[in-house]
Amino acid sequence: MKTYNATISQKKIVTLLAAVLLCIRPGMTYGDIEFAGGVTAQIDYTVDGAVWIYDANVIMVEPAHILEFVATGSGAVFDIYGGQIDQMLLISTSDDTLPEGQVTVYGTDFAIDGVPVDPETTELFLQGQMLSGVYENGTPFAFSVECFIMGGGGYSYYQTVKLGWVVSEPDIEVSQYDYDFGQTDIETTQYGTLTVYNLGNAALTIQSLQLEQDENLQFEFTPLQVMPLTLAPNTALDIEISYNPVLEGYAQATFRLTSDDPNDPVVEVALSGEGIPVVLSSQEQAVQILDTYDWAVENDLIEGVGKKKSAKNKLRVFGKMLTIADDLIAGGYNEQALEVLLMVEKKCDGQKRPKDFIKGPAAADINALINELINALQTQ
């Protein structure tokens, strides 16, 4: 047991009151921790017993847990910001040479035995009644309070518990105010998550979400199903955002959240990313050319040059040459593949000599892809 110079007279009177109120026998050990002699302390731990406070400044915060009772005497300043008292809070006085003890509970939504307390009330005289409420961090609490009565000489003096009303309001916070997607291949999508928190002690209403960007529209977010949306205290919400670059180079946008937070009604998150050209291997380029050829044939964007059967044969031979080049590259025969590609490139370059095998809106695109692969093979 920790002991901090508790005076005998103070300890006796509070011990006697505790014995009566808790129906326990005098002579037993009631206190596991005592604070006195002008010390300053903080309780943020579990006490397997009782706490005595005289002529000392003590605060109690989460995750404090007093398994028995807390008793305060003259000169005590006890501020409760969090934590739980299992049995009761006993507020007493006995020494006229010391200031009156001050016990204050900080929070909101105070109630006595379940009946709400008028927000204008600053102190209460309670005798065995249950004081409940919500701490500033949103944690609910409830414990019994016993206020001592001093009498004599024709007067009565009542101890009270003070109420430190905390302003109830939402408090918006986001996981980050600058979200950089980094380098991303053009025409691919990078996904991310932005987390919105309500750190306040009142519900937060998110009224709107907006994305401000240029005409290329490279950033997106997944809209919430219900707007406005209410976020309870100490809860969070994930919003999916994405970056799909269509151009090479740096891009940026602003994601804007509007809420009823009185201090930060508008929160802005800077989004950024860099689009980079996709670098394909020779094998991937060959597959891309074949895929483009098949797609163009299926959508009638290319056809063979000539009449009927001749045109069909040229279209088929052109595709076969692309397949041969692909097979050679897959087998590691790049030089032989290059010879085939140089021949097939001349069959779709739009020149009169030699004559082309294919024509149509997609012929130039296929020719450009073939030339890119030729250049890649020649520089290896």
Image: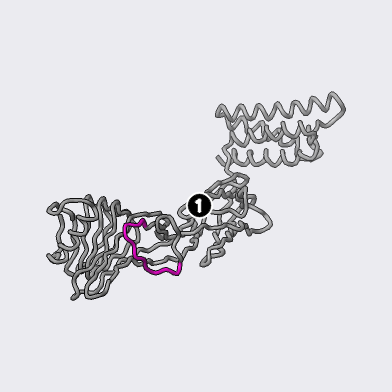
> What residue do we see at 83% from left, 32% from top?
305
Q: Where is residue 289 in the image (x, y as percent from the top left)?
A: 67, 35
Instruction: State left or right for residue 286 relative to residue 143.
Output: right
Q: Which of 237 and 159 is in front in this view?
A: 159
Give the magenta-colored segment's residue range. Answer: 119-130
- When the figure is inspected, residue 372 is found, relative to residue 107, above or below; the finding is above
Front position in the image: 185 or 95: 95
Residue at 26% from the left image edge and 60% from the top image edge: 90
Residue under numbered circle 1: 195
Query: How many dots with numbers?
Result: 1
Work out which residue is located at the far front of the displayed protein and give it.
Answer: 154
Indicate the position of residue 245 as horizontal and vertical percent values.
61, 50
**Residue 150 quadrant:** bottom left
Image vertical order of residue 26 relative to residue 349, above or below: below
In the picture, measured across the screen, residue 357 lies left or right of residue 307, that is left
> Quadrant location of residue 140?
bottom left
Q: Is residue 372 visible?
A: yes
- Measuring from the top left, give residue 353's x and y in whole percent: 80, 37
Q: In this view, does 325 lie to the left or right of 30?
A: right
In this orientation, which residue lies closer to the viewer: 159 or 358?
A: 159
The quadrant of the image that shows the C terminus is top right
- The verdict on residue 127 being magenta is yes
Residue 153 quadrant: bottom left
Residue appearing at x 74%, y 36% in the figure: 346
User: Could you tell me the amino acid type at mark 1?
Assistant: Thr
